[in-house]
Amino acid sequence: MGARDGNTMTDPEPGGRLTLQTIAMPADTNANGDIFGGWLMAQMDLGCSVLARARAQGRVATVAVEAMTFHKPVRVGDVVSIHASLEREGRTSMTIAAEAWVTRQPEGRRLRVTEGRFVFVAVDADGDKRPLP
C-alpha cells in the first residue's frame, strides 16, 4: 500500500493489478449521501478474490480483513477501481493488499479513497482448507 504524508496521498498511480471496476450508484449510499463503507469493502473483497482465486487456481474464502482505512468519501457516479497485490502467502493462505481508487465524473480526477488488507484461504469443494499449488 502506498506511502502517505498526513492526509495527502503520495502515490501518483494505483499499486497492484486492476481486478475490478464498477460505478457507485444511488442505492449504495449511506445516510450522509456518500457511498456506504460496507459496499466499498465488499467491492474490495471481490477485487482481492480475483487475485486470490488466480493464485490458488480454484476456490478461496475470505478469512480476515486485517486493515481498512477510508481516506476520502466515494460519491454517486464515481468510477470505482480496485487494485490488488499479493503481499504474503503461506501454505494455505494469502494476504492481499487492496487500494480503491475513484475517477470523479465529469472532471476525470483520480483519487485513492481506501486501502485495506484481506486474508484468503484456498479451499476445496467441501470448503476445507487446501494447500496452495
Image (cartoon, rainbow, N blue to C red):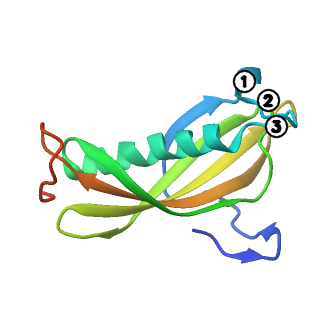
User: Which quadrant would the C terminus be assigned to in this image?
Assistant: bottom left
Whether residue 65 is situated above or below residue 33 in the rendered picture: below
Type of amino acid at the residue the image marks with label 3: Asp
Q: Which badge, 2 or 3, comes first in the chain's sequence?
A: 3
Give the residue drawn at x 57%, y 34%: 21
Secondary element at tag 2? loop
| Label 1 sits on residue | 25
Whether residue 42 is situated above or below residue 71 in the rendered picture: above
**Side of 20 where 93 appears, left or right:** left
Give residue 70's quadrant in the image.
bottom right
Type of amino acid at the residue the image marks with label 2: Val
Give the residue drawn at x 79%, y 29%: 76
Is residue 96 visible in this depiction of the protein? yes
Type of amino acid at the residue the image marks with label 1: Met
Q: Which badge, 2 or 1, comes first in the chain's sequence?
A: 1
Residue 85 % position (x, y): 44, 60
Is residue 15 visible in this depiction of the protein? no
Asked whether the beta carbons under mark 2 and mark 1 sit within 8 Å of each other, the answer is yes
Give residue 99's quadrant in the image.
bottom right
Q: Nearer the viewer, mark 2 or mark 3?
A: 3
Frontmost residue, 66 versus 7: 66
Residue 55 % position (x, y): 25, 52
Q: Which badge, 1 or 3, comes first in the chain's sequence?
A: 1
| Label 2 sits on residue | 76
Give the residue drawn at x 60%, y 30%: 22
User: Which quadrant would the N terminus be assigned to in this image?
Assistant: bottom right
| Label 3 sits on residue | 34
Asked whether the beta carbons under mark 1 and mark 3 sit within 8 Å of each other, the answer is no
How far, Cα to Cα, is label 2 from label 1? 5 Å
Whether residue 119 is situated above or below residue 33 in the rendered picture: below
Secondary element at tag 3? loop
